Image: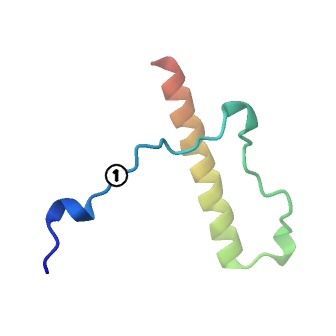
Amino acid sequence: MEMGRDEHKRKSRKPLGQTPKSEQLEARDVEFAEELADSADIEAQRRAEAADQRASQHQHNRRKS
């Protein structure tokens, strides 16, 4: 017995839960010892900082609109 296309596409009518803005926190890594860091740690730190800047810029741009 073959199933029709529609039988695979069941969409929930329930909205996804969202965290209220008042409960959202800015994620930060607080422990980082540069003297113990290897190249992967330094690269991860650089990428995290770049991601933080992009997120901050994105928030700033959304507020302007």
Occupied quadrant, residue 18: top right
- In the rendered view, would you say 2 is above or below 21? below
Left or right of 4 in this view: 13: right
Q: Residue at the location (67% across, 34% down)?
A: 20
Residue type marked 1 = Lys
Check the picture and name the quadrant holding the C terminus.
Answer: top left
Q: Residue 9, percent across and down?
A: 26, 59
**Residue placed at 40% from the left, 43% from the top?**
13
Closer to the camera in the image, 63 or 17 = 17
What residue sits right under mark 1 in the picture? 11
Residue 3 location, quadrant? bottom left
Residue 35 is situated, as x and y percent measured from the top left of the image, at 86, 73
Q: Quadrant of the N terminus?
A: bottom left
Q: Is residue 35 left or right of residue 13?
A: right
Q: Residue furthest top?
A: 64
- In this orientation, which residue lies closer to the viewer: 1 or 25? 1
Count of marks placed on residues: 1
Which residue is at the far front?
1
* Relative vertical location of residue 63 with respect to residue 25 in this rendering, above or below: above
Counting from the top left corner in percent of width and height, residue 11 is at: 34, 51
Q: Which residue does the image show at 54% across and 44% down from the upper left?
A: 54
Say which quarter of the image contains residue 37: bottom right
Residue count near mark 1 (Cα–Cα under 10 Å), binned few <14, some 14–19, many ≥20? few
Left or right: 42, with 58 as reference point = right
